[in-house]
Image (cartoon, grey):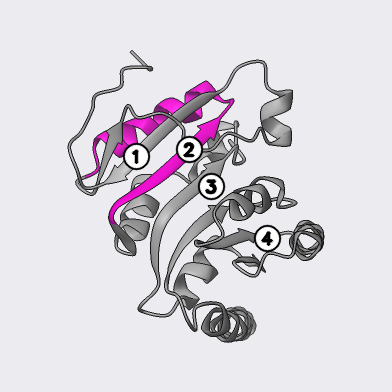
Amino acid sequence: MENAARTAEHFARIAERRAALRDTCTTIFASKTEFVWEIGCGHGHFLTAYAAVHPDRLCVGVDIELERIERAVRKRDRAGLPNLHFVRADVHDFLASLPDSARFTTIYVLFPDPWPKKRHHKNRLIQPGFIATIAARANQGCRLYFRTDHREYFCEAQAAFESSPDWRISGEPWPFELPTVFQQRADVFYSLVAVRGGQEVRVRDCE
């Protein structure tokens, strides 16, 4: 009974979080439903600069850490960017709370946690199941930009996109350069552009 009670409490907390997120998303997507999404936006350095250069695009950054989101919101407010929103949320809660009409046009995943220990690999974000889930909400031609300084994770992600029926790897250049804190610290990093649909370009970085 104790385990059943804890399980019920766990699912009740999830339902409460997602109900609050749905309210937030209803406000964000009230007038526009296509958006640029940064997963793991940190302190908002990259997405604030991106939104300033692209004032016509709705931009949403998501991060699980409250302190990061608070700093990102302060950046947004100082810059006066009505097209930019930062949301504290787990990525799966955020996806579950989006209105049905919401669609990604561009996705940035910049230097996510590589979970280097083998027993933690299951926690990596870019995996077949996840990229299939986001494909269902991505417009045709949506670009996903992935960058990491962890070569083994990069190769794993590249293999996932190469085997996906929904995404195709492209050899096109990176469209907006603004080094993140992690990029500035990296001796070397690896970049991947995946396109929702379209013709595949074979990129053999991991051979």
Which class describes the residues within 10 Å of circle 4: few (<14), some (14-19), or many (20+)? some
Q: Nearer the viewer, mark 3 or mark 4?
A: 4
* Disc 4 target residue: 64
Are dots 2 and 3 in contact, CB under 8 Å?
A: no
Label 4 amino acid? Ile
Instruction: Look at the image and say whether residue 93 sits in the magenta stretch.
Output: no
- Find the distance from the CA under tag 2 to the CA under tag 4: 19 Å
What is the quadrant of residue 183 in the picture?
A: top right
Q: Is residue 171 above or below residue 62?
A: above
- Find the distance from the CA under tag 1 to the CA under tag 2: 8 Å
- Find the distance from the CA under tag 1 to the CA under tag 3: 21 Å
* Disc 2 target residue: 146
Q: Nearer the viewer, mark 2 or mark 4?
A: 2
Which class describes the residues within 10 Å of circle 3: few (<14), some (14-19), or many (20+)? few
- Viewer-closest of 54 and 188: 54
Residue at 62% x, 40% y: name it. Answer: 113
Label 1 amino acid? Ala
- In percent of width and height, residue 77 lies at 78, 66
- Find the distance from the CA under tag 3 to the CA under tag 4: 14 Å
Label 2 amino acid? Phe
Label 3 amino acid? Asn
User: Is 62 displayed left or right of 96 in the figure?
Assistant: right
Figure disc tally: 4
* Disc 1 target residue: 194
Q: Nearer the viewer, mark 2 or mark 3?
A: 2
Q: Secondary structure at mark 1?
A: strand
